[in-house]
Image (cartoon, grey):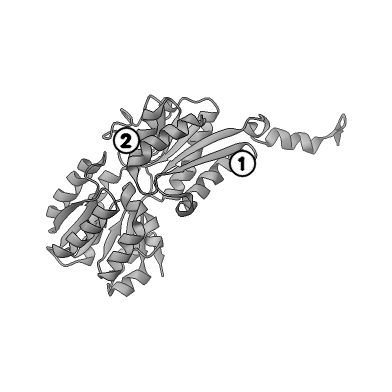
Amino acid sequence: MKIGTVPIFLIALALAAPAVAQSGKVYRIGVLEIAPASANRANMDALLRGLSEAGYVEGRNLIIDYRSADGHPERFPELAADLVRAKPDVIVTRGTSAALAAKAAGAIPVVMTTSADPVSARVVPNLARPGGNVTGLTTLVSELGAKRLEILRELVPPGSRIAAILNLGGPTAEAERGQIEPAARSLGLQATILDVRDADTLNQALETALEQGARALLINAEAVVLANRRTIVDFAAKHKLPAMYSAHEFVAIGGLMSYGVHYPQLYYRASSYVDKILKGAKPGDLPIEQPTKLNLVINLKTAKALGIAIPRELLLRADEVIQ
């Protein structure tokens, strides 16, 4: 059937297509990351999938302007300023330090794919109505240290020393430390907090952990740590140390276990914030989303290599077991 000379099925397709695909505008999304794109593929694929579902297709009506600090968070301010000069419609960030840098660089809307605690770090005044130019998602990392220690305790003898790797200069470090130290005492463990600011201090911290007799490692997802995850995973394997990580990315390359959010899902969710902002919403009016599901991932292959028997009850609690 036709209306005039246009087939009716073509009219239906046009009506069903996202309005953004018909606008003719090309949108520019700036991305501010700690890791290069080659090491961040799963997360970026999830972001692009969500954007594609909303009608934004890279190479057609979407340009991605990616900036990586390559493991050096001190570079975020200059990279954010560089992004602002490119005049993106939205800047997408990972981590609290990147969000703070993007916020300080100008008034361009910022969507956080993740931030440990944006309120205590003063990225936003509150989660329900963030105000200003920043919104997105939080991982509430600082609140999970106690739970990660509780799981890790099942793999070490009572009274064991746990080395926790933190960047004590980071915007959420004190909140995380305030969770870890009392939790360790209540669980009958000893916690050693080791300060990591760059690759050199990371290597020093790992050696200090050995010297102080640490029986396990507690690793957060801070920018420097995340960028050097291969170093940490290899160190734990070499010295037969069980380690609890904050992100699946560590377990995927051979880490023992992680407990926390699924980061690709956060990137996918962030695409809906980008879409709303591009359609006219003010970032300050969009509530910051908190995680609704936390995943326990165990790499059983790594456990066998370390000579660790994972308790059956813990395996049954796992959301994913890597054989």
Image x and y of residue 191, in percent: 15, 55
Q: Left or right of 128: which side holds 155?
A: left
Q: Secondary structure at mark 1?
A: loop
User: What's the CA distance linking mark 1 and mark 2?
Assistant: 30 Å
Q: Quadrant of the N terminus?
A: top right
Image x and y of residue 124, in percent: 33, 29
**Residue occupying the point 28% across, 50% down:** 198
When the figure is inspected, residue 317 is found, relative to residue 301, above or below; the finding is above
What's under tag 1, amino acid-wise? Val
Does residue 213 appear in the picture of this structure? no
Q: Left or right of 233: which side holds 50?
A: right
How packed mark 1 is, by other alpha carbons closer than 10 Å (few <14, some 14-19, many 20 or more), is some
Observer-nearest residue: 146 or 89?
89
Q: Left or right of 16: which side holds 130?
A: left
- Mark positioned earlier in the residue sequence (1 or 2): 1
Q: Left or right of 238: which side holds 28?
A: right
Image x and y of residue 249, in percent: 39, 56
Q: Secondary structure at mark 2?
A: loop
Does residue 292 appear in the picture of this structure? yes
Observer-nearest residue: 97 or 302?
97
Q: Which mark is residue 118?
A: 2
Q: Quadrant of residue 314?
A: bottom left
Observer-nearest residue: 313 or 190?
190
Q: Quadrant of residue 53?
A: top right
When the figure is inspected, residue 307 is found, relative to residue 266, above or below; the finding is below
What's under tag 2, amino acid-wise? Pro
**Residue occupying the point 32% across, 74% down:** 305
Task: Give the residue number, with chain letter if any, for mark 1.
Answer: 57
When the figure is inspected, residue 305 is found, relative to residue 204, above or below; the finding is below
Residue at the right extreme, as displayed: 5
